[in-house]
Image: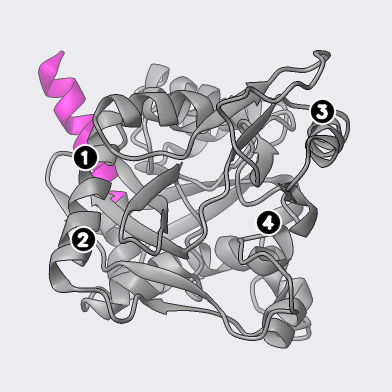
Amino acid sequence: MKRLRVLVLVHPDLIPPESTNGYTEQEINVWKTEYDVVSTLRAAGHEVRPLGVHDELKPIREQIDSWKPDVVFTLLEQFRGEAIYDQNVVSYLELMHVPYTGCNPRGLMLARGKDLSKTLVNYHRIPVPDFAVFPMHRKVKRPARLALPLIVKSVNEDASYGISQASVVDSDEKLAERVNFIHERIGTAAIAEQYIEGREIYVGVVGNERLLVLPVWELQFQNMAEGDWLIATEKVKHDPDYQERRGIRHGPAQDLAPELALRIQNMAKRIYRALELDGYARIDFRLAPDGTPYFLEANPNPEIAESQEFAHAARHIGVSYSDLLQRIVALGMRRATAGAAAA
């Protein structure tokens, strides 16, 4: 790939330093994705400029006009503090006719709403847990069809935000308490879905039209306290000390029959297309003891630090971290070229 000017959009608090020297593992963990992407693209020969973006589009416009980047690598997970607004930043880049990495605005919209994505995926005959949505400022009443236990989440936040051991509820009283927690502390509607006993598995997908499906990956819980639910809480996802203490690991899903692994990968491709995703995404499942994979959610533009499961799964099939990032950049530029040709 030729040398490119790459503008990397990040939250202002996550602009990475030039080096990790002098920082603790806990401090590095906060901006590890931003550091890995910026430093790896620079090592590959590109000119890379991080830009902090919080609640204004003007800085993006100024950089586009003055620096004229070849592509924008977007690592934003929110805009103005709202996860669902990241699609608007991408829409703005499309209006500016600037190539960008990751998912298109329509795919972001379809995937961000857990209720909408589950409804669409279920229409395509892929198993999803039974669920109900509890809007803000409404009385919490569990539908009779929805059996306990349930897991309660924000309807549109990602990265396990707001998820803890208390998210799994086994009574109507606990359900009401947790829904109110989501309403008051997270500030969104809540979704309560059937808790699926089983294995937490992920499938990464890279591509626009032609798709590369990564190996089935598993989140492993090796040393959890007795009685704990085996779920991907905020601590499981983001707290290195907790991960070490509880033996949280990720790696290739073991002991899967080849036909089941292939079935799960094919389901991931169908979901990716049904939700009109492109660029790269991670599809999350729970694999029940009877071998049924239940779709949980789709994560466009997932965590892509070099140490995380997406990059590890790519490396497992011979795609280095540098090659993965450059493939993502190339997909963004290719989509822009295809759009211009269609116009």
Tell us which disc is closer to us: 2 or 3: 3
| Residue, disc 4 | 15
Tell us which disc is closer to us: 3 or 4: 3
Tell me which amino acid carries mark 2: Met
For disc 2, the neighbor class at 10 Å (few under 14, some 14 to 19, many from 20) is: few
Quadrant of the rendered structure where residue 233 is?
Answer: bottom right
| Residue, disc 3 | 183
Quadrant of the rendered structure where residue 139 is?
Answer: top right
| 158 left or right, relative to 227 | left
Q: Which mark is residue 118?
A: none
| Residue, disc 2 | 1
Q: CA distance from mark 1 to mark 2?
A: 30 Å
> How far from the left and from the top, in percent, is residue 260?
20, 64
Tell me which amino acid carries mark 4: Ile
Look at the numbered disc 3 and give the secondary structure of its residue: helix
Please provide the residue range marked out in magenta: 329-343
Q: CA distance from mark 2 to mark 4?
A: 25 Å
Q: Which mark is residue 270?
A: 1
Q: Earlier in the sequence, mark 2 or mark 3?
A: 2
Residue at image coords 42%, 36%: 68
For disc 3, the neighbor class at 10 Å (few under 14, some 14 to 19, many from 20) is: some
Tell me which amino acid carries mark 1: Arg
Residue at image coords 58%, 52%: 50
Quadrant of the frame with the C terminus: top left
Q: CB atoms at circles 1 and 2 under 8 Å apart?
A: no
Q: Earlier in the sequence, mark 3 or mark 4?
A: 4
Q: Is residue 252 highlighted in magenta?
A: no
Tell us which disc is closer to us: 4 or 1: 1
